[in-house]
Image (spheres, rainbow, N blue to C red):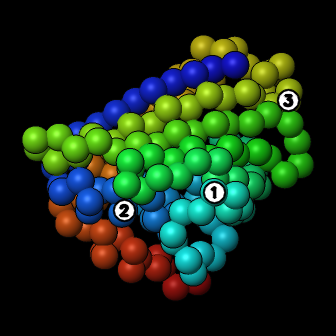
Amino acid sequence: MVTHHAAALVRRPVDVVTAYVFDPRTMPHWSGVLFAIEPVDDVEPRVGRRLRAELKVLGVRLTVEGELLDADLEERRATVRIVPLDGDGAIEHRLWVEPSGDGAVVHFWNRIEPPGWLAGAVSDQLVEAFVEHTARFALDNIRAILENGDEDAVAGLTGPAG
């Protein structure tokens, strides 16, 4: 099992940061591993809510389901448990945002129980390095998107016509 915490200061109002990071539709914009999430109409966090998503972890595509275990927007915190649909392992991801004089600090805390196929194939050090890298990548993206006011531009990207 691997646990990890990372945080970053985002120089935007705490309510703006909270609304952005708690909206599941924004997650593919800033995540280092989540590249697709099922369509979401209602963005209000509700305990027990489940969403499916597509992840890419160390080159392996996984379909996962996340269940919101805890959510309190007034306290600016939530916990989700993420499990692969076709295997073992789990991620407990806690997200919280705290006010700061310069804006808001976004925290990610993760406890990863790697699936057997991964735990048996790679070292804990590689899993730890991957978690650190993806957390930093996500936090840096959140900071860049929000501090540059690019939320709407990023949300409107459609990519090249296929």
Residue at (63, 57) in percent of width and height: 47
Dot 1 crowding, Cα within 10 Å, few <14, some 14–19, many 20+: some
Q: Position of residue 140 (x, y in %)?
A: 32, 44
Q: Residue tagged by mark 3?
A: 117
Q: Residue tagged by mark 1?
A: 47
Mark with earlier residue (2, 1)? 2
Tell me the quarter of the image containing the C terminus.
bottom right
Camera-near label (3 vs 1) is 1
Which sits in the foreground, 140 or 109?
109
The image quarter containing residue 151 is bottom left
Q: Position of residue 64 (x, y in %)?
A: 75, 53
Most distant residue in the bottom direction: 161
In the displayed structure, 37 sits above or below 115; it is below
Q: Position of residue 150 (x, y in %)?
A: 25, 67
Left/right of residue 148 with respect to residue 143 in the rendered view: left
Q: Which numbered circle lies on residue 20?
A: 2
Q: Cα distance, mark 3 to mark 2?
A: 34 Å
Which sits in the foreground, 143 or 92?
92
Q: Position of residue 145 (x, y in %)?
A: 28, 59
Camera-near label (2 vs 1) is 1
Left/right of residue 72 with respect to residue 150 in the rendered view: right
Q: Amino acid at mark 3?
A: Trp
Camera-near label (3 vs 2) is 2
Mark with earlier residue (3, 1)? 1
Dot 3 crowding, Cα within 10 Å, few <14, some 14–19, many 20+: few
